[in-house]
Image: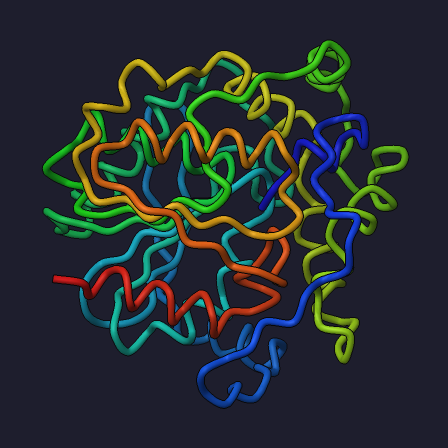
């Protein structure tokens, strides 16, 4: 659920040059999930829902019982990328997830939709579900939506987990040119020249070597996203600056740092940690930027630990 680097390898270098370092576990590692079986059961058991908004229709799923946990998308990629994590959390949390406008297969990018609109979507979904208090999990682009929601709906958002978060992300000149040009690209990411090689360079090393198909799952999901949608999201990133407002985010926030993010991302997370009144940082080594796919058990353990703190 990253994405800017999938448009251009001249964006911030998001892949670490050093190989992954093994992280010792205090307990035996659980057996790897058979993701195809999990995804099939996720589709069979999760309740599909629709919510009409002023400019578009939201489509999502809900699975599980317990306290509501809302999972926001990152850069591109459909909500199905959370299937493994949701499957592990379903007995403790009612997980609610959906696609941003323009992300679902066959969708068109919608210009003019703002981060405030996306935060209002979250609040509308919560109201429809009857949730007066929710927790959030959000990576990359989704962290901006989470910050907007925490500011606009402080009574709704209880706690937030931000993976690879930022309050302000500067784009280089080349990135800005690419973003403007890609607003009119007619195809999906899988048709964008060079994007497959960039994704493999940036992310493949973190995926389980014993299962090539899990990498293919990511490739297929992200590859279906319209390039114009990623350009729209990049435009929102370019124009966003939440730094002056971070002191007003009084919710408890966990900042998750994964390997392979790059120096710029680390600087952004340092800014967040210094400015957010109630936050702490948590490194997650050897997972890459898609830990919900590469190491879902570790993410589930982290989510439970943070959300269940007194």
Q: Nearer the viewer, residue 260 or 64?
A: 260
Query: How many discs appear?
Result: 0
Left or right: residue 88 versus residue 203 is left
Residue located at (55% from left, 15% from top): 238
Is residue 29 at least partly visible in the picture? yes
Is residue 43 at least partly visible in the picture? no
Q: Nearer the viewer, residue 108 or 181?
A: 181
Please say which color scheme the image uses.
rainbow
Image quadrant occupied by the C terminus: bottom left
Tell me which corner region of the image, top left, top right, bottom left or bottom right, holds residue 31.
bottom right
Q: Tell me where residue 92 appears, x and y as whole percent.
A: 25, 74
Residue located at (41% from left, 19% from top): 114
Tell me which corner region of the image, top left, top right, bottom left or bottom right, holds residue 235.
top right
Residue located at (67% from left, 31% from top): 4
Tell me which corner region of the image, top left, top right, bottom left or bottom right, holds residue 213.
bottom right
Q: Tell me where residue 147 appears, x and y as whole percent.
A: 32, 31
Left or right: residue 102 versus residue 118 is right
Q: Tell me where residue 183 appears, x and y as whole percent.
A: 68, 17
Q: Nearer the viewer, residue 266 or 150?
A: 266
Left or right: residue 67 versus residue 207 is left
Residue located at (89% from left, 33% from top): 193
Q: Tell me where residue 154 appears, x and y as whole percent.
A: 14, 33
Q: Is residue 271 positioned above or below 303 on the image? A: above
Q: Is residue 25 positioned above or below 277 on the image? A: below
Q: Is residue 160 positioned above or below 85 on the image? A: above
């Amino acid at each position: 659920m990253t994405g800017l680097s999938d448009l251009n390898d001249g964006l911030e270098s998001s892949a670490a040059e050093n190989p992954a370092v093994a992280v010792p576990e205090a307990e035996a590692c659980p057996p790897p999930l058979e993701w195809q079986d999990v995804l099939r059961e996720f589709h069979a058991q999760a309740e599909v829902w629709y919510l009409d908004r002023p400019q578009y229709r939201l489509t999502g799923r809900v699975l599980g019982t317990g306290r509501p946990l809302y999972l926001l998308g990152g850069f591109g990629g459909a909500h199905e990328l959370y299937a493994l994590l949701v499957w592990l959390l379903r007995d403790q949390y009612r997980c609610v997830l959906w696609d941003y406008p323009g992300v679902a297969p066959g969708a068109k990018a919608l210009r003019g939709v703002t981060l405030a609109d996306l935060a209002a979507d979250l609040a509308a979904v919560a109201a429809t579900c009857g949730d007066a208090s929710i927790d959030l999990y959000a990576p990359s682009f989704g962290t901006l939506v989470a910050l907007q929601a925490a500011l606009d709906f402080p009574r709704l958002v209880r706690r937030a987990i931000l993976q690879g978060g930022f309050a302000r992300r500067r784009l280089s000149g080349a990135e800005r040119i690419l973003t403007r040009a890609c607003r009119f690209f007619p195809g999906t990411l899988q048709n964008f020249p060079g994007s497959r090689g960039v994704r493999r360079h940036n992310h493949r090393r973190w995926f389980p070597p014993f299962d090539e198909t899990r990498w293919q799952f990511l490739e297929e999901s992200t590859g279906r996203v319209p390039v114009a949608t990623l350009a729209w999201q990049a435009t929102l990133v370019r124009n966003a600056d939440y730094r002056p407002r971070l002191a007003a985010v009084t919710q408890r926030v966990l900042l998750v740092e994964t390997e392979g993010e790059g120096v710029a991302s680390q600087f952004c997370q340092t800014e967040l940690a210094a400015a957010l009144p109630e936050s702490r940082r948590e490194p997650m080594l050897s997972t890459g930027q898609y830990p919900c796919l590469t190491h879902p058990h570790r993410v589930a353990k982290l989510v439970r630990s943070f959300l269940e703190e007194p």
